[in-house]
Image (spheres, rainbow, N blue to C red):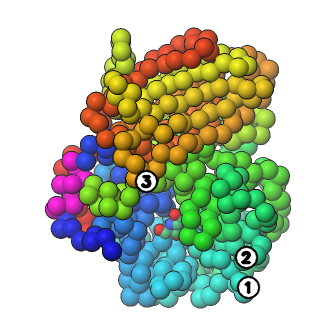
Amino acid sequence: MTDTTVRADEQLVRAQSDRLRPAFHFTSPAGWLNDPNGVAQVDGLHHLFYQHNPEAPVHHRIHWGHAVSDDLVHWRDRPIALRPGEGADGDGCWSGVLVDDAGTPTLVYSGRQGLRELPCLAVGSADLEEWSPLPEPIISTPPEGDLTAYRDHCVWREGDVWRQLIGSGVRGDGGCAFLYESTDLREWRLIGPLASLPAGQIAIDDPDWTGTMWECVDFFRLLPGDSAGTAATAPPDAASGDPHALIFSAWHEGATLHPLIALGRYRDDGFQIDRVQRLDLGRRHAYAPQTYRDETGRRILWSWMQEGRTDEAMIAAGWSGAMALPRTLWLDRAGVVRQEPVPEFAALRTHELAGDWSGDTLDIEVDALVGDGQRLAVTVLATPDGEEACVIELARRDGALHLSLDRSRSSADTTADRSRLAGTVPEPGTADDRERPSRLRVVVDRSSIEVFCDGIALTARVYPTRTDALGARVEGDAAVTRAIAWHMAGAEEHNRIQLR
Ligand code: DQQ
């Protein structure tokens, strides 16, 4: 068994000196990070809570870390918000959400004890820094039936009641979300499954598979718009008749597979799903998304950029897990969900690169008309001899645009995940838009690559071993109309300390 015990100061030194640690993506000071939790903007300040093990970069005895930001780019660590207690959360404080209970900040989360999770609640101070968990779970037992799992929460105010979804799945059937109702957040009445999808016969490795359990359910209204800033969003409301979206992460027998978004109609106590879309072509590298509506009305999405290296490599590095850049999510007029990093990150572009592009913290934008049979390739993190390189390709075949990331040469370390990630890019809704060049944006941050093609995301992790894996270039026979690379500054707070 791997020895995970490392002194706090030693772990912090390892984490801070790892050259693969992202410079402008949020990471914990050291130790383990997974799902974003309790994301919100309160009195102007953005809050990011997150699944965290401060002791070691492994998923064990999960706490809630906490950081705050004025601009979504620069984050300040705050004290740990939740730690395993003596009751239902004795073995971990798993994922959950923050709600405003008539002025009292309140967390609803999954307490883990043994192999079981139950809904728990903690009441917070006005500054969201001190939390008092209730001694008992707020729901004492899962619904009857042979459930694959039961955890993770979405809680909202609808009319004069609270409603809550809890992620689950029925063995032999498929994933589902249970709907509950309450007047006080403490006593809950089960209404029944809000939505479910049969897992069917699709193979586990099919990127559209909806799984046997839905983790991290997130439900909201999403109205069509022309761009990130114009699509209205709000908490769920069955009476509104508006289109609704349900995000969930497909899970099966302990495997964290990929995030999906279901679009449909919420009426009374049911969500009629019209279609399901892959939320990120990077699959498990953009897992467990959670969203909130910020004070400007944007739907902001956070997700966990899961690692693709071994436990031993993570322990040697002193840290594990980063957050993908916060993104604005919108629904286009053709009914396709699109996303892009919040524009605040442009503040980190220090200068445009001239001549040969080079760097491991880059923001690249390429506009190109990709005709049938043509391709556009953006290579990043490449060594001069080509031993290591990551190749992003946009290619049109039979009219359809295909986006892929070839990681086969991303690392000379054969234990790293070097599998290919790929999917199709739905065309923009209007004919005018279809005649415009496609925009490919590639954000590189050491071991992180995020690709956006006209708002379709592909998120990945890569582990170059060579310090000269810095080259970047554009190739292919597509007609490139614009290509710019910016060097990106770091955004991490100085002198972070290991909070335990
Ligand atoms: N991670 C949490 C769970 C959730 C899973 C535990 C998703 O609550 O289901 O850390 O990554």
Q: Earlier in the sequence, mark 2 or mark 3?
A: 2
Residue 109 in view, yes or no: yes
Decide: is 399 above or below 110.
above
Going by the image, does 454 lie left or right of 313? right
Q: Quadrant of residue 377?
A: top right
Q: Quadrant of residue 9?
A: bottom left
Which residue carries the number 1 mark?
A: 145
Q: Earlier in the sequence, mark 1 or mark 2?
A: 1
Q: How many marks?
A: 3
What amino acid is at disc 2? Val
Q: Quadrant of the N terminus?
A: bottom left
Q: Quadrant of the C terminus?
A: bottom left
Residue at 42% x, 64% y is 51
* Of the two numbered discs 1 and 3 in the rendering, the one whose residue sits closer to the viewer: 3
Which residue carries the number 3 mark?
A: 307
Query: What is the magenta range?
Result: 9-17
Q: Earlier in the sequence, mark 1 or mark 3?
A: 1
Helix, strand or loop for disc 2 = strand
Q: Quadrant of residue 338?
A: top right
* Residue 499 rendering spot, x and y as whole percentages: 25, 64
Majority secondary structure of magenta residues: helix
Q: Residues within 10 Å of mark 2 (few under 14, many from 20)?
A: some
Helix, strand or loop for disc 1 = loop
Which residue carries the number 2 mark?
A: 170
Q: Residues within 10 Å of mark 3 (few under 14, many from 20)?
A: many
Q: Are marks 1 and 2 in contact (CB under 8 Å)?
A: yes
Tell which of 410 and 90 is nearer to you. 410
Residues under labels 1 and 3: Cα distance?
34 Å
Decide: is 113 above or below 172.
below
Decide: is 264 above or below 431.
below
* Residue 135 rendering spot, x and y as whole percentages: 45, 88
